[in-house]
Amino acid sequence: MTTAVLAVAMTGAGLTATAGPAAAAEPPPGTVVKLPVTSFSQFAVDPANQRVWIAGENTGDAGSGPGTVLGYGFDGVLRAQRQTEGRVSGVAVEPDGSRIHVGRHGGVQSYDADLSPLGVTPAPADDCGRELVHSGGLLFLTAREGGSPQECAEALGTINATEADGTTPRIVMYTGSVNHLEAGPGGMLLTAPERRSPADDPDLGLYRVVQGDTENGVLEFLGETFLGGDGAGQGGMDFRDAAFSPDGSTLALADGDRGTVLLGTPGLTRRENPYTPLPEGAEPTAVAFSGDGKWLARGAAASGATSDLTLESADPADTRPPVEVAFEGAGTGDRVVPRGVEFSPDGRSLFVVTTDAEGAGYWLHVIRTPDGLSASRFADGTAHEPDPAVAGEPLTLRGRLELDGPAPATAPRVEVAREDADGVHPLEPVTVGEDGTFTVRDVPGLVGEATYRFGYAGDALHRPAEDALLTVPVVKASAALALTAPGEATRRGGVEITGTLTVRGGPLASPAVLTVTAADREGAVRLAPVTVAADGTFTVAHTPRVRGNVTYTVGWPGDDLHEGAEASATVYVRR
């Protein structure tokens, strides 16, 4: 599956999206909020309370605290916020939403959904960034002491689990390197060590949570793998993130060297990757499956217009092109943080945390997937007046945009373009009224047919509408000739007739040249052509050849945009 560049401004999010040529997918609408933190450790999605919980390690410059816990609604609105007394790291939520757990140096602080404290569970000390995950009914957490990044990388650490009653956690595993945890369905737990050097080959370990008389009392070993033995010469695993498919059969890894790696469970065997490769220059940072199994999202760190987020169908047989989003511009961040992508449980929203190149600012993006948007459409019966349209004269087109579900926060805008024999001409977008109606005014410039295309790219609540087309016939503008002639004249004095050529529509491309004939009792003769002045006036001068009535006929054949015109005047000629 390939992608080609199709730049589109994303509604309210300051983003750029690209999509494959087959279907020119519109970018997903969404919202973005600046997080009031200067560092980020982990975030968790809470279905019960409809919250996204974020732990910011500290908001000061010393690196030791205080920390910040944030709770955002699925709409991106801040619902709860609390500053902690000391540094925090890691966040997890009970499946029923009753407790939000946040890691601290010597334990786990629990809060309710309003971030009111519920108590602290003691735990082994952590200085290096505690991770928390729920699996199999237990809370797992990491612990590692170290006064510097080097000490954290080399110190002995532990993976711990609470008892079923939530009391002080027991050590279930000792680790020689920094470990990341990922929970999977059916009580699965993945342990993923960090690579300390390119020559290091850390092993992924897969376990199932049990509560019985097993060897370690908590975890049953399912399998492990070393990616350095894949024969590709890329060294060991450079772990950034992991995600289980909803049925637990597939594990997707974001690997710094390999991009997206797919493993089968429980044996962690390599699988062929059918998904779109990340763009050249994009460093993988995050991966997530939606809970309904329909979508796969992958985050990356990339510069410029290179995509930082790829959203595509999780079904390899789905031929819809992926949507690729480049986070760029002030106030949005320009890369996805490690482990910074998660879906809402129903797969209708995607939550993405981004940061800037300096890692000093953080943003939360709430992006609607196509399944999370209400429908929009253009109603039948788009009308225009006059009918037919006249080249060079104003044309009014009226239509109606119908939106299912709630109304967007800002009035929708309809994109309009006219296509005629001279190509495609984008017009100014128009704003839709409260009743859904919109009005477009244009001046078609060519005779023939003008096809107007109306488009709606969607918003934070609605899918894009299928384009509406209206073909309008355009005819030539009318013209008129008016003559002022004397009632009588003499052969000696001659005849002088003045006149005016009036045209509607656009101006003439060149001065009009008129034909003139004079008809008397001896027949008709063609006189010299007459050129019309810029103000439309002209004069016909003639010396009659006989006495009696002479009829003068003035004609203009018209041009590409104007109809022709003709006028006559009769003068009685005396001797």
Image (cartoon, grey):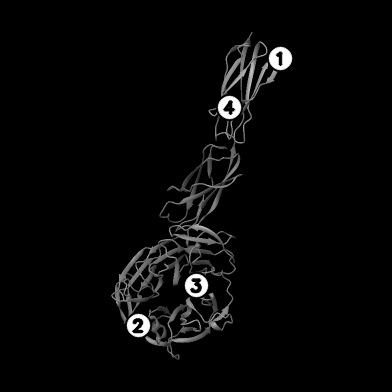
Q: Is residue 155 above or below residue 271?
A: below
Q: Earlier in the sequence, mark 3 or mark 1?
A: 3
Dot in front, 1 or 4: 4
Work out which quarter of the rendered image holds the C terminus and state it: top right
- Circle 4 packing at 10 Å, graded few (<14), some (14-19), many (20+), is some
The residue sitting at 38% across, 70% down in the picture is 53
Q: Residue furthest top?
A: 575
Say which residue label 2 marks.
147
Task: Estimate the spatial distance between the alpha carbons at disc 1 and disc 4, rounded to whole Å.
Answer: 29 Å
Dot in front, 2 or 3: 2
Q: Position of residue 67 (x, y in %)?
A: 32, 73
Q: Amino acid at mark 1?
A: Glu
Q: Amino acid at mark 2?
A: Gly
User: In the rendered view, does 181 fall on the left or right side of 280?
Assistant: left
Q: Is residue 527 above or below residue 92?
A: above
Q: Earlier in the sequence, mark 1 or mark 2?
A: 2
